[in-house]
Image (cartoon, grey):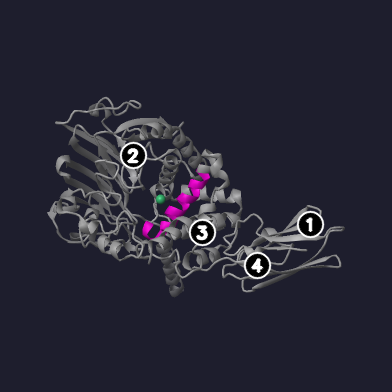
């Protein structure tokens, strides 16, 4: 009796320890004194950190990303050792002069008033705590630091190729996330991010000539004065005095900003939604296309709200800066000298990251393919609504990219950590293309309306948290009643591919005999179209046994996943004869060889 009770209790504890989700929380208050002419700044940071984990913490860590922009940093060495380095990085870090390098130096650090010992290893600050942080307890860290903004190489930095003075991303000592997988002290090599959910209150003191765009909502527009809010006005502030810009953001996992003396700014309002900010340097090209961007992005956000969940913040900013496009909470930095299609395309992609990274805070090192892939997928949905020409090509690029490498020795599974891919190309295809095709295949498995409802439920259940692929799977399984383990398993942890073919078709004595073959390792439910000589056609659906699809019971026998062959015979409709058989007639499967999907009878 006693033993049974204890076993039962342990079972309950064991279960709740696994099933109960927790996440750390943080609040940053920062005062930043920017010395624009020296490209340096000093900062004071007050961090309130709450340990919501069931473990006691004896150490904490911070990211010091700017340290990556020094010769022989991990980012520099990694870039020089990859066979296909990012062209924007290449060997540029190795050649940065001292005044072009980046650094973040911690000057002092206290925990609840007590000075702490710490050590820096590359881009990671390791902090020995004066007192452990027990589960459920919070502490206050106070840090003073100084930093130099590197010449823009990747994402962060000063004086980018388009002449934007400051692209300030990964710019402050940022607490490393601790979650169910432990600490995430990945050295920065220029790739993915993970952060603690929390609030930011950031004041930037800077030469009054500069206009700043940032994560969050500007708290003191009156103090900043005329020019920041009115539509489209170019403003020339006088240099020489200091302006203090105060931005606040709640429930985000990072904070970024950009500053330039030439910026102009206008806003557009999403009906019943966020204020969109457009901040760019006027010139002969940007003056044509940036003013047009606003209306497109209002519509883009409406499409996202409708299909993937409602944007949760008051503001979103599109800012010219950085190198290409990169997403941050409530803003993006994009290069701005683009024609309309490219400008809208990059803006849609980066804004959509507000859903797949910004609000669904994936651990990007492990779920970069949910971050980039789902963003690409939703980008195709939005672009199809904005431009008729984009509709017909939606998802084609994703399939093409994935199929160009699928199953080859160059492909690596999605379970590979983002930083550890052997080539940039393999990473790019896994993240952007295979991640997008993942959703297309999932939609094929569950059907269009259930797909939409499940994506919305995933968003509403997991926004402002760190969901994983498993969390997505559980929602899709619950809503569809289908078993999807086999699909997630094959698609994420292997480089197995889909390939089905038609072995033979025989029509004799009013009977059609079909022999189908599974050549690839990933099984899928199948659709087969039978075309008749009179121009009509008929569709056959073959269920997959491991999916446990009840909707097809009483029809054709399921295809057992262990079987490579499937034979079926069916009575031909009267007075009809077969002209052709096509497997996957809507081209929805990521079938690596479509040649064997069709047989035309003579
Ligand atoms: Zn992206």
Residues drawn in magenta = 364-382
User: To which residue does mark 1 refer?
Assistant: 532
Earlier-in-chain disc, 2 versus 3? 2
Earlier-in-chain disc, 4 versus 1? 4
Q: Dot 1 lies on which element?
A: strand
| Horizontal side, residue 112 vs residue 448: left or right | left
Name the residue at 43% across, 75% down. Answer: 3
User: To which residue does mark 4 refer?
Assistant: 501
Disc 2 versus disc 1: nearer the observer: 1
Please check the rendered image and state whether residue 368 is part of the magenta-colored stretch, yes or no.
yes
Name the residue at 29% across, 29% down. Answer: 228
Tell me the distance, in whole angstroms, between the alpha carbons under discs 2 and 4: 49 Å
* Tag 2 near tag 4, CB within 8 Å: no
Q: Residues within 10 Å of mark 2 (few under 14, many from 20)?
A: many
User: To which residue does mark 3 refer?
Assistant: 473
* Tag 2 near tag 1, CB within 8 Å: no
Disc 4 beta carbon < 8 A from ligand 1? Answer: no
* Tag 3 near tag 1, CB within 8 Å: no
| Horizontal side, residue 355 vs residue 233: left or right | right
| Horizontal side, residue 185 vs residue 520: left or right | left
Earlier-in-chain disc, 2 versus 4? 2
Earlier-in-chain disc, 2 versus 1? 2
Q: Dot 4 lies on which element?
A: strand
Query: Where is residue 66 drawn, in percent x and y?
Result: 22, 53
* Tag 2 near tag 3, CB within 8 Å: no
Earlier-in-chain disc, 3 versus 1? 3
Q: Residues within 10 Å of mark 4 (few under 14, many from 20)?
A: many
Q: Which mark is residue 319?
A: 2
Query: Where is residue 143 drawn, in percent x and y?
Result: 17, 50
Tell me the distance, in whole angstroms, between the alpha carbons under discs 2 and 3: 35 Å
Tell me the distance, in whole angstroms, between the alpha carbons under discs 3 and 4: 28 Å
Q: Dot 2 lies on which element?
A: strand
């Amino acid at each position: 009796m006693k033993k049974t009770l204890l076993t039962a209790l342990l079972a309950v504890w064991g279960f709740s320890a696994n099933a109960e989700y927790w996440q750390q929380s943080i609040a940053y208050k920062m005062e930043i004194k920017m010395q624009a002419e020296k490209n340096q700044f000093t900062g004071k940071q007050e961090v309130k950190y709450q340990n919501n984990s069931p473990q006691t913490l004896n150490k904490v860590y911070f990211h010091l990303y700017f340290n990556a922009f020094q010769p022989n940093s991990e980012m520099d060495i990694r870039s020089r050792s990859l066979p296909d380095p990012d062209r924007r990085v290449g060997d540029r870090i190795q050649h940065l002069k001292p005044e072009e390098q980046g650094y973040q130096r911690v000057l002092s650090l206290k925990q609840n008033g007590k000075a702490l010992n710490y050590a820096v290893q590359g881009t990671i600050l390791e902090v020995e705590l004066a007192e452990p942080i027990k589960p459920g307890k919070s502490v206050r860290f106070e840090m003073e630091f100084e930093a130099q903004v590197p010449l823009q190489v990747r994402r962060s930095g000063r004086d980018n190729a388009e002449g934007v003075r400051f692209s300030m991303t990964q710019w402050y000592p940022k607490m490393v996330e601790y979650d169910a997988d432990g600490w995430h002290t990945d050295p920065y090599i220029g790739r993915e991010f993970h952060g603690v959910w929390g609030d930011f209150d950031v004041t930037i003191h800077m030469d009054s000539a500069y206009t700043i765009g940032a994560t969050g909502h500007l708290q003191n527009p009156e103090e900043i004065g005329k020019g920041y809010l009115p539509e489209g006005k170019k403003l020339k502030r006088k240099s020489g005095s200091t302006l203090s810009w105060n931005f606040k953001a709640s429930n985000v996992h990072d904070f970024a900003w950009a500053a330039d003396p030439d910026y102009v700014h206008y806003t557009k309002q999403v009906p019943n939604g966020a204020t969109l900010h457009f901040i760019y340097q006027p010139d002969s090209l940007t003056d044509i296309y940036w003013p047009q961007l606003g209306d497109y992005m209002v519509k883009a956000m409406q499409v996202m709200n409708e299909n993937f969940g409602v944007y949760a913040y008051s503001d979103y900013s599109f800012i010219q800066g950085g190198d290409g496009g990169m997403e941050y909470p409530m803003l993006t930095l994009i290069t701005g000298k683009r024609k309309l299609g490219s400008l809208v395309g990059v803006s849609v992609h980066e804004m959509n990251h507000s859903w797949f990274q910004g609000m669904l805070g994936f651990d990007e090192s492990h779920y970069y393919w949910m971050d980039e892939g789902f963003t690409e997928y939703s980008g195709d949905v939005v672009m199809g609504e904005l431009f008729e020409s984009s509709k017909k090509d939606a998802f084609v690029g994703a399939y093409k990219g994935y199929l160009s490498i699928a199953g080859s020795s160059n492909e690596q599974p999605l379970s590979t950590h983002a930083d550890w891919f052997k080539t940039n190309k393999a990473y790019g295809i896994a993240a952007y293309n295979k991640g997008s095709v993942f959703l297309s295949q999932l939609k094929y498995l569950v059907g269009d309306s259930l797909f939409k409802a499940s994506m919305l439920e995933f968003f509403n259940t997991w926004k402002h948290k760190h969901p994983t692929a498993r969390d997505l799977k559980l929602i899709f399984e619950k809503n569809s009643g289908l078993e999807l383990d086999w699909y997630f398993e094959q698609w994420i942890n292997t480089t197995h591919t889909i390939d089905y073919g038609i072995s033979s078709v025989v029509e004799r004595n009013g009977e059609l005999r079909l022999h189908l073959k599974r050549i690839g390792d990933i099984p899928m439910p199948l659709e087969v179209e039978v075309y008749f000589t009179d121009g009509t056609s008929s569709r056959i659906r073959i269920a997959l046994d491991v999916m446990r699809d009840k909707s097809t019971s009483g029809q054709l026998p399921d295809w057992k996943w262990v079987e490579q062959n499937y034979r079926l015979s069916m009575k031909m409709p009267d007075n009809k004869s077969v002209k052709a058989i096509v497997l996957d007639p809507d081209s929805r499967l990521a079938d690596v060889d479509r040649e064997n999907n069709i047989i035309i009878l003579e």
